Every structure is written in C-alpha cells, then in structure tokens.
Image (cartoon, rainbow, N blue to C red):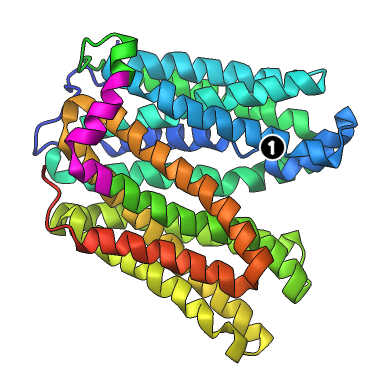
Amino acid sequence: MSQLSSLQSTAPADRALPSKIVFLLAAGAGLSVASIYYAQPMLGIIAATFHAEVSETGLVPMLTQIGYALGILLLAPLGDRFDRRRIILVKGTLLSLTLLLCGVASSWSLLLLSSLAIGLVATVAQDIIPATAALASDNNRGKTVGMVMTGLLAGILLSRVFSGVVAELFGWRSVYAIAAAGVWLITLTLWYVLPSFKPETTLRYPALLRSLGKLWLDYSALRRAALAQGLLSVAFSAFWSTLAIMLAERYHQGSAVAGAFGLAGAAGALAAPLAGSLADRRGPNFVTKIASALVVASFSLMFVLPLLPVPAQLAVIALSAVGFDLGIQASLVAHQTIIYAINPAARSRLNAIMFTIVFIGMAAGAALGSKALDTFGWTGMVLLATAAATCALLIRLSTRADKE
C-alpha cells in the first residue's frame, strides 16, 4: 500500500508535497534520463570490445535518442489513460532490464537493439514529471516541478562523469550493471511511496494518439510554449554540438576542456526551482520572457569574441554558456507550468507534445549548427543561435497571458 495513500492524485491548492517525496521523484527522473547518456563517454571502449568501425560508434547514441523520441510520442500519452504509478513501475522495471541487457550484450547488433530499447523506456522520466504536477498543490506547482527538473538535469549532467570514471576503473559493462540496480531501487521506492493516480481519460490507444493533434489545434498556449521552447532548443543544441570542434580547431583544446564547459549545466539545474518559484509568484509567462531575453543576450555576447585576447574569449564563451543554460532551463520549467495548467486531464499528452517539439528543435539545432560552423565559422553558429532565441523571445513577447 502506498505511503501516500492519504493524498489524492490531484492535490488541493494549499497542500505542499513532502520534501522527501519530491526528492525521490527528482532522483527517479534523474536516474531514468541518465540512462540515455551513459554510453557517450564510453563509445571508444565499447567500439574496441566489438571491433566496430569509428563510423559505427555514433549508432549507439543515435538509436538511444531515436528510442527516446519515439517513447515520448508513443508511450508518454499513456499516463493520461492508465495509473501513472503502475506505468512508472512497469517502465522502470523494463529500463532496469534493458540496461542489464546492454551490459551483457555479446554482439554489436544486440548492443544497438538494447540501446534503442533503453531510449524507449527511459521516458519514464516523462511520466514522473506529470505525476509531480498532479501531486503538487496549485500554489506550489511551479516550484515543485522545478525541483524535480533539477534532478532530471543533474542526471544529464552527472551521467557522463559517472560512466566515464566507472568505465575507466571497472569496465563499461559495470556502468550498465550499476545503473540497472539504481533504476530498480528507485522504481521500487516510488511504487511504495506514491499514491495511485486515477486515469484522466477512457480513450483507447489509437484515439489517445489522435487526440494529440486535437490538443495542438485547441490550445494556442500549448503551441506557443512548444514552439518557443523548441526554438530555444535549436540554439542550445547548435552550441553544444559544435563547441568541441570549434575548441579543437580554434584553440587547440581537447575533449577534457569541452567537457569542462558542460559544467555550465549545473547552473541550469540550480535555475529550475528558482524559476518555478518565480513562476508561482509572478506567473510563468513573465518568466518565459525574462528567460528568453537572457538567452538572446548570452548568445549575443559572443559576437565580441574577435575583439578579445584568447583567454578572455574562453572566459566569455564560458560566461555565455552559463547564461543561456540558465535561461533555457528556466524557460523550460515555466513552459511546463503553463501547459500543465491548460488541461489537467491531459497533462501526459501535453507534456509529450511539447517534448516532441523540443526534441525536433534539438535535432535541427545539431544539423544547422554544424552546417553554420562549416560554412560561416563560429560567428555563423552564434548568429544562428541568436536568431533562434530571438524568435522564441518574440513569441513570448506577443503573449499577454497563457490561460486559454
């Protein structure tokens, strides 16, 4: 029986979710999403194990990301149709098993197949976030979702560090074994502490998927939130997908330096609960405007690089990374607060729609950023990122309120 059986799946306006439960939800989101990033620092070691070509190593993260995108679109909407507590148990169990399968894979093809499967069920993180929104009180929803997002962002940030260190000491297979144990432990814990969630709809699966299009057409607030966050994701992905190449070509710096810039993600993790609290006090629309403006300003700052000496250039890039990461993560939390208030009965589907657009933005940013860097150099990438962020800001500035 759930330890929170006294709570309803939708909390009253004045009830704060216990901090221990928020921590467990954050840990669940972080451990789940970390699963899709463990392989990245280990690709060289994994390729050596299976004697794979360098050109083939990119298939592992690519299939994991494809699986995650498909999982968001095809599986995340089920949270509105079935008890989210059971969904978290089933998908968490499957994630643990697929991590183990990846760790014991005896062939390259089995490793690729299990990587795709990891991406599909790692979307349990996208079930935990709507569950958090349903449990949180109306007056604290932004702050609570922000705190759980901190866990998710910390999982992304620390996953590469964890897998790189553990693989170096104990081998890459041990990373998956430890990760599987961690996911299984947090899954069982969440099953014990969470209440059951009453399904919000009786739609069958095909109708549930068709309803995604209707939700998109019905709610302009959803369209603005998804498009604005998608454009910010274009800028985010363009920067991070080209940074290592630029640092190597322009400053002759290796992957360790590029990885150090990734610590800027810690700023984003810290921004999430602060942004949520500000959204509760001033409204999420206000936060999206401030956050988008911060992203535009941060990318624009890099236009001064040619005027500075090399040490100052690296410092400006780092400062810009901290600034735009703060803005993008703050905007994400605020946009989630907006969409969760649109239709409480469709939170999982609304979340799936927005993150599908975010993923498309990430993919587009990686492709366009690489093209801009190759054709116009780093200034071209900065121009692309600034333009995308400016478009997001214009969308938010054209919005008076998101209560449709």
Q: Please state if 324 lies on the left or on the right of 317 as rendered.
A: left
Magenta stretch? 210-224
Could you say whether the residue bearing mark 1 is in a helix, strand or loop? loop
For the point 62% across and 72% down, the residue is: 378
Residue 95, how many percent across, how many down? 55, 21
Q: Main secondary structure of the magenta part?
A: helix
**In the picture, residue 11 is in which quadrant?**
top left
In the image shown, does 240 or 180 lie closer to the viewer? 240
Q: Residue 374 at what x, y percent from top left?
A: 68, 64
Please count the marks in the image: 1
Residue at the (75%, 40%) spot, across then down: 42
The quarter of the picture where the N terminus appears is top left
Q: Is residue 7 magenta?
A: no
- Quadrant for residue 262, please give it: bottom right
Rendering quarter of residue 381: bottom right
Q: Is residue 21 above or below residue 114?
A: below
Is residue 2 among what the camera can see?
no
Q: Is residue 273 above or below residue 352?
A: below
What residue did someone put label 1 on? Answer: 39
> In the image, is residue 218 part of the stretch drawn in magenta?
yes
* Front-most of residues 201 and 169: 201
Name the side, left or right, on which 90 lies relative to 259.
left
Residue at the image position 40 percent from the left and 49 percent from the top: 230
Q: Position of residue 306 (x, y in %)?
A: 61, 86
The amino acid at mark 1 is Ala
Mark yes or no: residue 29 visible: yes
